Amino acid sequence: MKRIEKIIILLILLFSVVFIVLNKINITDKVIVSVKDANNNTLMSFDINEDNYYSFDVKYGKFNLEVKDGKCRAIDVDCPNQICVHTGYISAENPVPIICLPNGIMVTINE
């Protein structure tokens, strides 16, 4: 293999890595979490990349969300079945919504 061919292959690999990294950064910069009530009204929207703790007054008491390391989960929720808590973390890579039927809350990932 000639030297120019090696340089071209190296440049293609370098551009590929840069493209993948930039694409990943753009995806995570645009990840928004929406919290909606039973009537599909947005209660709050926030960036999943900003670590925080949110609390909402709901039918059975409190609905608490923890946002950490680009992931979001329901914790310390006052509801009879705790399915929303057992859903675990959601993220851009795992955008399954968190749904609390007793409290009428749905948490979704929007890109």
Image (cartoon, rainbow, N blue to C red):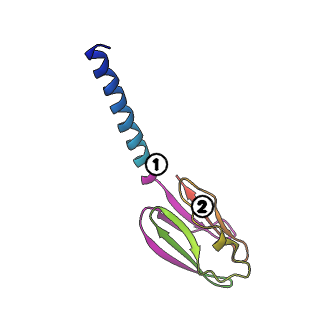
- The amino acid sitting under disc 2 is Thr
Taking the spot 53% from the left edge, 62% from the top edge, the residue there is: 33
Check residue 27 in the rendering and tell me which mark sits there, or answer none. Answer: 1
Check residue 108 in the rendering and tell me which mark sits there, or answer none. Answer: 2
Toward which corner of the image does residue 83 lie, by quadrant? bottom right
Residue 94 rendering spot, x and y as whole percentages: 58, 55
In the image: residue 55, left or right of residue 98: left
Asked whether 39 falls inside the magenta stretch, the response is yes
Within 10 Å of disc 1 (Cα), the crowding (few <14, some 14-19, many 20+) is few
Residue 104 rendering spot, x and y as whole percentages: 69, 73
What kind of element bears circle 2?
A: strand
Position of residue 99 relative to residue 94, above or below, is: below
Q: Nearer the viewer, residue 32 or 94?
A: 94
Quadrant occupied by the N terminus: top left
- The amino acid sitting under disc 1 is Ile
Disc on the earlier residue, 2 or 1: 1
Taking the spot 41% from the left edge, 66% from the top edge, the residue there is: 50
Residue 17 rendering spot, x and y as whole percentages: 37, 37
Residue stretch in magenta:
28-56
Q: Disc 2, disc 1: CB below 8 Å?
A: no
Position of residue 39 relative to residue 61, above or below, is: above
**Furthest-front residue in this view:** 1
* Cα separation between marks 2 and 1: 16 Å
Asked whether 68 falls inside the magenta stretch, the response is no
Q: Nearer the viewer, residue 110 or 13?
A: 13
What kind of element bears circle 1?
A: helix
**Furthest-top residue in this view:** 2
Toward which corner of the image does residue 82 lie, by quadrant? bottom right
In the image: residue 34, left or right of residue 7: right
Taking the spot 48% from the left edge, 76% from the top edge, the residue there is: 53
